[in-house]
Amino acid sequence: MEQLLSPQNLILLIGGAALVGTILTVAVFLLQKSFSRNLKSGKPRPQKIRVEDEAAFTLATIKSVVTQLKTDQKSLQDKLAVAERNAEENARKFELIAREIEDGLIVFDAQGFISFSNPLLRKMLAVDTWSRRRYTEIFQNTPAASELIGTCFAGGTEVRKKHVEFEVPNKGKKLIEATVLPTRDRSGAMESVTCIFREVKQTTPKT
């Protein structure tokens, strides 16, 4: 018993106990650290978007935009085609009506160039309305008529049933009742000027 309690043995026992305690402490620390790491690794992590996924998404978006643009373009083309057909139909109706009226009719566009005339006007005034000319050229022999049309273009002034003496080529002078009317678009800008001419039958005074 005394041999067991000798100073040398006591030192060995204390040292061994201390070593065991140290080992246990380190072991507990390592276990706690490992457990904490496992808990953190168990949390859901946000998935990273792969480059392939981003490329596919971009391509799908571009395809969708292109498809929408093509659809819009086709819709606009269809509307334009309908508008053109309506305009052509209205022009044909206007021409048919203009041919049947008993007055000479001539229309000038916004730049003053002739855009339409009926056969009666060409017969009445014997003017060349087939070429693209301005009103100043067509009525160069009748300054009064050019002035009425020019005033209408400049300020939108209407003239109704005004007597104007026209110089008709190869036929001398004719007294014409002239009506000059402006046409404006939705914005208020001058769109055209329409002239309606009616020949005044002059009576010879009885003697």
Image (cartoon, rainbow, N blue to C red):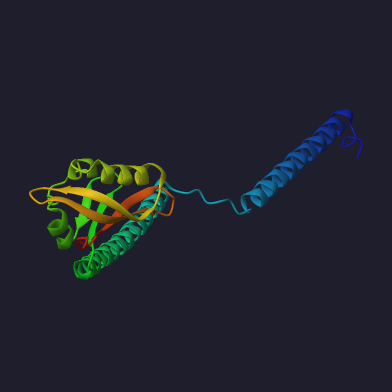
Q: Is residue 7 left or right of residue 164?
A: right
Along the viewing direction, whichever of 160 and 93 lies nearer the viewer: 160
What is the quadrant of the N terminus in the image? top right
Q: Point out residue 72 in the picture as x, y percentages from the top left corner.
A: 35, 59
Q: Point out residue 58 in the picture as x, y percentages from the top left corner.
A: 40, 50
Q: Please, is residue 90 above or below residue 16 in the view? A: below
Q: Quadrant of residue 79?
A: bottom left
Taking the spot 89% from the left edge, 31% from the top edge, the residue there is: 6
Taking the spot 23% from the left edge, 54% from the top edge, the residue there is: 175
Q: Please, is residue 186 above or below residue 88 in the view? A: above
Q: Point out residue 176 in the picture as x, y percentages from the top left corner.
A: 24, 55
Q: Quadrant of residue 199?
A: bottom left
| The residue positioned farthest toward the front in the image shown | 207
Taking the spot 10% from the left edge, 51% from the top edge, the residue there is: 171
What is the quadrant of the C terminus in the image? bottom left
Along the viewing direction, whichever of 159 and 162 lies nearer the viewer: 162
Q: Is residue 78 left or right of residue 170?
A: right
Q: Is residue 131 left or right of residue 70?
A: left
Along the viewing direction, whichever of 111 and 2 lies nearer the viewer: 111
Q: Quadrant of residue 177?
A: bottom left
| The residue positioned farthest toward the left in the image shown | 170
Q: How many marks?
A: 0
